[in-house]
Image: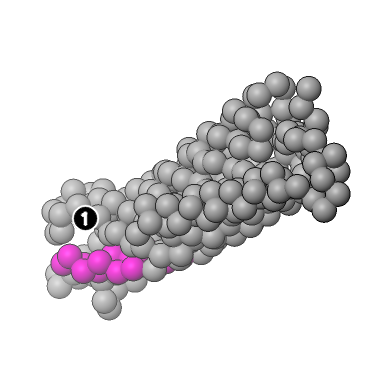
Amino acid sequence: MLSGILGLALASATAIASANAADMLRAPAGGYKDTPAYVEMDWSGAYLGGHAGGVRASDKVTDLEGYGFFPSLTNNASGAFGGGQLGYNWQRGNIVFGVEADLGVMSINHTATERIPASIKDNFYADVTGRLGYASGSTLVYAKGGVAYFNGEAKVVNPGRTFTAAKDFTGWTVGGGLEYALSPAWSVKGEYQHFDFGTEKSAIYGCCTAGNMYNFHYGHGLTADAVSAGVNYHITSGYEPLK
């Protein structure tokens, strides 16, 4: 599913780019003397926008006490992914570098049932990354990486017992994408990101038949892979004539 979404995003960007190029080559009523000179995008400046796509998440659950009541299991979930972004670029020749912050939602609700049910629940995510790319005309190819945060929860449930959930996952993200400028103000992009939100703990508390209190702790290693299509509005960018 994720590869299909990315393909659709890149196909859409290519179609828009082709139409834009055709308009630039088409002569106006007054002849080619009235056609603007070909110009190159200056990626420097601030921008903001939005993105949407799909995500596949994986919660690797482990028994931290090693009691062996259930084997380690992996709870997989797929869903929607999207939000907004804000960033700033600097350009030096063909090299573009900058910072970007994302905030959005990962829809990854799912419950696995291997002896004891384990579930993950969606909520918002955020990341702050550095970007480094290569610009050629109106096209920018880039890589990104930085810190990531997920506010959802993961837990192991034993009916009739008291349990807690793992929350506030903090880790890292890496990815990359392709961005195409439609005009000095607007660009479209297709992007892939891998998230490793680290490992957090959940617990089950209860009492066995002998009357002894017990508690079981579980580790939740949460990762996710997402692809998205997006649009950016460039607040302080522009075109420069080619020389």
Which residue: 56% across, 34% down? 142
When the figure is inspected, residue 25 is found, relative to residue 104, above or below; the finding is: above
Image spot of residue 161 (x, y percent): 29, 73
In which quadrant of the rendered view does residue 82 lie?
bottom right
**Looking at the image, which is closer to me, 91 or 104?**
91
Q: Is residue 123 above or below residue 73?
A: below
State which quarter of the image contains the C terminus.
top right
Residue at left 62%, top 53%? 19
Total residue callouts: 1
State yes or no: residue 114 in magenta. Answer: yes
Give 43 or 23, whichever is nearer the viewer.
Answer: 23
Residue 51: % across, % down? 58, 57
Residue at image point 60% right, 48% down: 17
Whether residue 149 is visible here, answered yes or no, is: no
Relative image position of residue 197 (x, y in whole percent): 44, 46
Q: Is residue 172 left or right of residue 27?
A: left
The color scheme shown is: one colour
Give the percent coordinates (x, y) of residue 170.
Answer: 50, 46
In this rendered view, identify the residue nearer to me: 238 or 223: 238
Residue at figure coordinates x 80%, y 30% from the top left: 241
Q: Which residues are magenta?
A: 110-122
- Circle 1: element type: strand
Q: Which residue is mark 1?
A: 73
Q: Amino acid at mark 1?
A: Leu
Q: Residues within 10 Å of mark 1 (few under 14, many from 20)?
A: some
In this rendering, position of residue 196 left or right of residue 68: right
Q: Is residue 100 visible?
A: yes
Residue 1 in magenta stretch: no
Q: Main secondary structure of the magenta part?
A: strand
